[in-house]
Amino acid sequence: MLSPLVATFRTPDLRKKIFYVLGILVLYRLGATMPSPGVNFKEIDRCVEAASQGDSGQIYSLINMFSGGALLQLSVFAIGIMPYITASIIVQLLTVVIPRFEQLRKEGQSGQTKMTQYTRYLTLALALLQSTGIVALAASGNLLPTTGGDCNSQEIISDRSIFGLIIIVLVMTAGALLVMWFGEIITERGVGNGMSILIFAGIAARLPSEGRNILQSRGGLAFGLVCVAVLIILIAVVFIEQGMRRIPVQYAKRMVGRKMYGGSSTYMPIKVNTAGVIPVIFASSLLYIPQLILQITNQNNTEVSGWQVWMQDNLINPSSWFHIVLYFLLIMFFTFFYVAVTFNPEERADDMKRYGGFIPGIRPGRPTAEYLGYVLNRITLPGSLYLGIISILPNLFMDLGGSSAQNIPFGGTALLIIVAVGLDTIKQVNSQLMQRKYEGFLK
């Protein structure tokens, strides 16, 4: 284990890339802790702490997870990387609906450059919309509604004039665009996927404080049990994330001019978790909508109606069985949906046929597409069950443990992201080491 690590830092090019990524992460965390102009940082800090202890603590923990605690504190990088991720997903899904986007995707590098340009424009629009909504909620005192402690949610923004609110919106929008640029240059000049590494940094930055809170509030025994549980879940996540179905592919020999090509045997890997963590993000975002609706409808502190009570008890309360079952089913649905959008068996079968490839025992063309679709559906089912079970574990612990287990950190979503990003980054470092004939991290 030490020899690949030493070889990594002895390689000048690879060492430069790693330190480049670390430097960008330092700037990212600095912007995540820097408050926007006109924000009362001390007051919002008290409100965040009070809101995290309430009935909606799991919702606020989820919001904080992707932004590394920056969103609820209205920092410069409060919007974070989520507008760019949302824009990327939307553009990717539109390739199935809009023929123009599908044509650009098939044009190679020039088409990809155009798609990236569309993604940036959509990121700007989403960042402006999201920052406007968050500032409006904060100005009206509904961003962190709480009645406990000495929190005064009306004093989060000290300057609530039109000019002051516009300045905060512009600063947050510019911060989101800067974070987007950070992610792109990490991907281009560093190691790993820049967007994933920024999310990884936001989650990892919160783990020490959450661990300290467990140690101080529940004692060393509970902290040790949580660490053991996290280790077991981590091993299981790594095991399943590495699992894949290898479909053998044989390429026939063909003559091109005076040279013979093909005649090789390879395989097509289909991972058990083909969709990654995207279905969990979709399901979590969809379940946040009821909380947002209640915040908007209760701006005037009117009398709570029956449907609002039902939404609070069933949709918003993360320990209710209705919420857990709905969350699980949404993850399964979005897993199949996202895999169906990103993996096209007919397109893969046509590519294999075009280059003289075939699956042994399966005829090229339509039979190959049907076989790939059959294998994909069978392997997606256990992948969706795995994503659903890992994601609802904190909710089950809350229901079984009551109020003492209300704010369980190290949730399944965080572990999924940490493992996926860690494995992807290590694989990229490993491939660069193997090119230089060094022993890699993975064997």
Image (tube, rainbow, N blue to C red):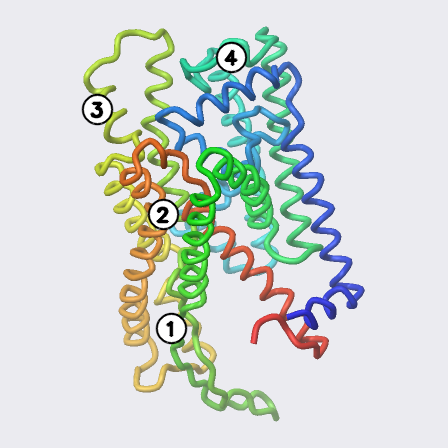
The residue closer to the viewer here, 402 or 417, is 402
Earlier residue among tags 3 and 2? 3
* SS class, disc 3: helix
Q: Which residue is mark 2?
A: 391
Q: Which residue is mark 1?
A: 245
Left or right, 141 with reference to 189: left
* SS class, disc 4: helix
The CA span between labels 3 and 1 is 44 Å
* SS class, disc 2: helix
Earlier residue among tags 4 and 1? 4
The CA span between labels 4 and 1 is 52 Å
Q: Which residue is mark 3?
A: 310
The CA span between labels 2 and 4 is 33 Å
* Residue 398 seen in this snapshot: yes
Where residue 190 is drawn, which disc sits there?
A: none
Q: Does residue 416 sit above or below 1 in this rendering? A: above
Q: Which residue is mark 4?
A: 139
Q: Amino acid at mark 3?
A: Trp
Q: Amino acid at mark 1?
A: Arg
